[in-house]
């Protein structure tokens, strides 16, 4: 009996050693790449070369503490085919500027003008309309930092917006500048940078209102350190907030807070060709970051964009109507669906996105938290897609795949 226990023990030890060796092998292979690669680098890192090129060619007037002039900020976000020559460590280079935002040019200019004033900017619109994307790239171009960020939630507290304390130091030393823990708000005020406040309306109204004095007076008092201890914003400081106007779990803003913002509505894209361009560009970019080169046929891309535009409006392009969905069919959801289809094609297909992958992922995207959307989706397929499937192989494959997965 003891011999049997010994043999079991040796077997377990051998398996443990084998597992440890495999882990060491994996860790040694990925050690260098893990330190160098970020899952999602901020815009100022991703587009560092473009920013350097624009800085060295910027001859336009700039507001105080801005890294780029308003004109160059617009070029950075809208993109340009012009070759900008610049110098890095004695090496001469040239670069064109990629397009980051495909929306209305007037909208972008109004946003830049607002930030050049002392008035805060509120980007409002339906979910998935690139509000956060625009906010990040505006911050990167204006001040070179897009990471002074507060994410609004139902659990956001006032100290996350203003300041908090290192409680170990607070107990041992009492209130002091050393025990003060600065928030992104204070850091951006001290450095004259842009503060990003994402999904402001998800915060309770009393928490939202803690921003009023910051926006109007540009100062944060620290009463625990004395009545004269005030943190003032220096030139360049401003706030970009975002909010969804069609979503669950949002709170109304007070009239006093609304008066501190310039509101700019970011609309849903209704131009089919522009939407196809955006979806293809972002999906290709996201898939390339994980090393995937997936074929996206034109007819499959056209199918996806058509479906999303019809599901948003509750009306087919041929004129038929169906019950609209409660789920917001945003462009960002569209990009996410196409990326998932691309990954599926890589591992379980032939490295080409097929209509069946779109159908499979569409069901999950539509249902989400409302199961009633499933019956509405069936209605859409019965009234719109079924008739269309008789005229096109792509639509036929899409329709058949939906019936299979349902």
Image (cartoon, rainbow, N blue to C red):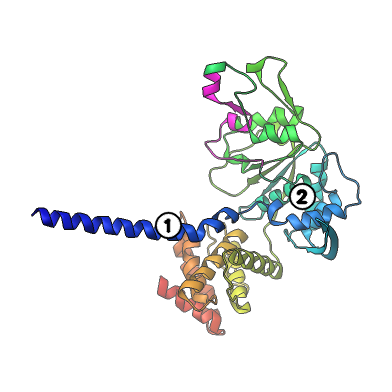
- In this rendering, position of residue 23 left or right of residue 381: left
Q: Quadrant of the N terminus?
A: bottom left
Q: Is residue 154 magenta?
A: yes
Please indicate, yes or no, whether residue 391 appears anywhere in the rendered image: yes
Q: How many marks?
A: 2
Q: Which numbered disc covers residue 141? A: 2
Seen from the viewer's position, the closer of residues 22 and 50 is: 22
**Residue found at the far left of this picture:** 1
**Residue named by callout 1:** 24
Seen from the viewer's position, the closer of residues 260 and 11 is: 11
Q: Which numbered disc covers residue 194? A: none
Residue 51 quadrant: bottom right
Residue 52 quadrant: bottom right
Q: Is residue 69 magenta?
A: no
Frontmost of labels 2 and 1 is 1
Residue 354, above or below 217: below
Q: Position of residue 76 (x, y in %)?
A: 79, 56
How far separated are the C-alphas under marks 2 and 1?
Answer: 42 Å
Pointer 1: residues within 10 angstroms few (<14), some, or many (20+)?
A: few
Task: Name the residue at 55% across, 40% down.
Answer: 153
Magenta residue span: 148-171
Q: Position of residue 209 (x, y in %)?
A: 64, 30
Task: Name the residue at 52% across, 18% down.
Answer: 171
Pointer 2: residues within 10 angstroms few (<14), some, or many (20+)?
A: many
* Circle 1 SS class: helix
Seen from the viewer's position, the closer of residues 377 and 36 is: 36
Residue 76, above or below 221: below
Q: Mark 2–mark 1 contact, CB under 8 Å?
A: no
Q: Quadrant of the C terminus?
A: bottom left
Q: Position of residue 117 (x, y in %)?
A: 83, 39
Seen from the viewer's position, the closer of residues 215 and 34 is: 34
């Amino acid at each position: 009996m003891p011999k049997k226990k010994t043999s079991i023990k040796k077997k377990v030890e051998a398996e443990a050693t084998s597992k440890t060796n495999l882990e060491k092998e994996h860790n040694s292979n990925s050690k260098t790449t893990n330190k160098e690669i970020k899952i999602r680098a901020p815009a100022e890192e991703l587009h560092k070369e473009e920013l350097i090129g624009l800085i060295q060619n910027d001859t336009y007037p700039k507001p105080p503490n801005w890294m780029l002039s308003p004109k160059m900020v617009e070029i950075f976000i809208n993109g340009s085919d012009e070759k900008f020559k610049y110098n890095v460590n004695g090496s001469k280079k040239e670069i064109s500027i990629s397009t980051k935002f495909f929306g209305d040019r007037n909208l972008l200019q109004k946003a830049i003008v607002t930030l050049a004033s002392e008035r805060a900017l509120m980007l409002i619109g339906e979910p998935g309309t690139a509000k956060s994307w625009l906010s990040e790239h505006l911050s990167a171009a204006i001040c070179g930092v897009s990471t002074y960020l507060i994410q609004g939630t139902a659990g956001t507290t006032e100290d996350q917006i203003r300041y908090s304390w290192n409680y170990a130091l607070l107990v041992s030393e009492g209130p002091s500048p050393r025990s003060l823990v600065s928030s992104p708000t204070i850091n951006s005020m001290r450095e004259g940078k842009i503060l990003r406040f994402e999904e402001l309306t998800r915060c309770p109204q009393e928490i939202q209102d803690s921003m009023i004095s910051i926006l109007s007076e540009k100062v944060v008092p620290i009463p625990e350190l004395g009545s004269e201890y005030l943190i003032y914003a220096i030139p360049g400081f401003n706030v970009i907030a975002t909010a969804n106007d069609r979503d669950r779990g949002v709170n109304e803003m007070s009239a006093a807070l609304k008066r501190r913002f310039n509101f700019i509505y970011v609309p849903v894209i209704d131009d089919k060709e522009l939407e196809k361009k955006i979806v293809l560009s972002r999906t290709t970019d996201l898939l390339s970051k994980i090393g995937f080169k997936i074929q996206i046929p034109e007819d499959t891309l056209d199918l996806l964009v058509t479906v999303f535009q019809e599901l948003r409006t509750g009306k087919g392009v041929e004129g038929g109507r169906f019950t609209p969905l409660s789920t917001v069919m945003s462009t960002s959801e569209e990009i996410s669906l196409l990326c998932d289809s691309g990954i599926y094609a890589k591992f379980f297909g032939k490295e080409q996105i097929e209509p069946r992958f779109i159908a499979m992922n569409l069901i999950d995207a539509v249902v989400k938290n409302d199961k009633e959307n499933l019956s509405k989706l069936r209605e859409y397929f019965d009234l719109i897609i079924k008739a269309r499937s008789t005229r096109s192989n792509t639509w036929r494959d899409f329709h058949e795949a939906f019936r299979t997965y349902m």
